[in-house]
Image (tube, rainbow, N blue to C red):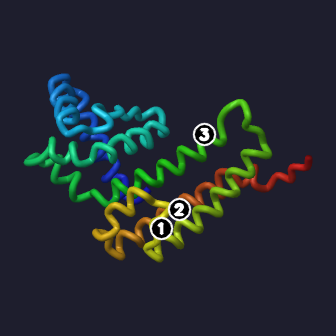
Amino acid sequence: MSARLHDALSIVIKVVNHIKSNSIQDRLFRQFCKQNGEEFEWLVLHREVRWLSKGNCLKHFIALWDSIISFLAHTQLGAKLLANKNDVFYLSDIFEKLNTLNKQLRGNDSDLISSKSAIAAFLRKLQLYKNYIRRRAFEQFPCLACVSSDLQDEDLALYGEYLENIHEDMQTRFSDLLGMDISI
């Protein structure tokens, strides 16, 4: 992950921990969400030991974006969050896709054939996602589509580079599985 995307994720984690670490802040935030008629009234606390929790944390975070920004108005943390809005929305979409892949690879129904198929399909999708990003076609990125008018070419280049890095990393990590000849 690039330093810029890592910083954006760190800010989200700081905001969540800032709200959740203090019981008064947490209660005030819940009341604020209730007054705003939000679907959720709480944030998912990020746990460093499970990267899957980052996706869940981001999913709730984006759903509560407007309330979080209003709640943190006039704070330095709120200003940092606003400055990283595009990156946070992009990361939410990417982590959602990674969570989906992770769920396909786990469970009782998972075997070598289904795992190889899921990873190979995801690698092909990553190439498509990169092309979509470059063309400003955000159908596969619903959160990013919400901020598409704010996106600059440098943002798209960074997101495309990140997708390429994920692709290369996954090809390396799963080279043994992808290279297996599995006969039925």
Which label belongs to residue 103? 3
* Tags 3 and 1 touching, CB below 8 Å: no
SS class, disc 1: helix
Marks 2, 3: nearer the viewer = 3
Give me the C-alpha separation between circle 2 and circle 3: 21 Å
* Tags 1 and 2 touching, CB below 8 Å: yes
Question: Percent from the top left, x then y, of residue 128?
Answer: 58, 68
Which label belongs to residue 144? none
Give me the C-alpha separation between circle 1 and circle 2: 6 Å
Callout 2 amino acid: Asn
Marks 3, 1: nearer the viewer = 3
Q: Residue furthest left?
A: 74
Callout 3 amino acid: Lys
Q: Is residue 120 left or right of residue 103?
A: right
Q: Is residue 61 above or below residue 79?
A: above
Q: Is residue 179 left or right of residue 27?
A: right
Q: Is residue 151 left or right of residue 184?
A: left
Callout 1 amino acid: Glu
- Quarter of the figure with residue 168: bottom right
Which label belongs to residue 165? 2
SS class, disc 2: helix
Front residue of 39 and 99: 39
Which label belongs to residue 161? 1
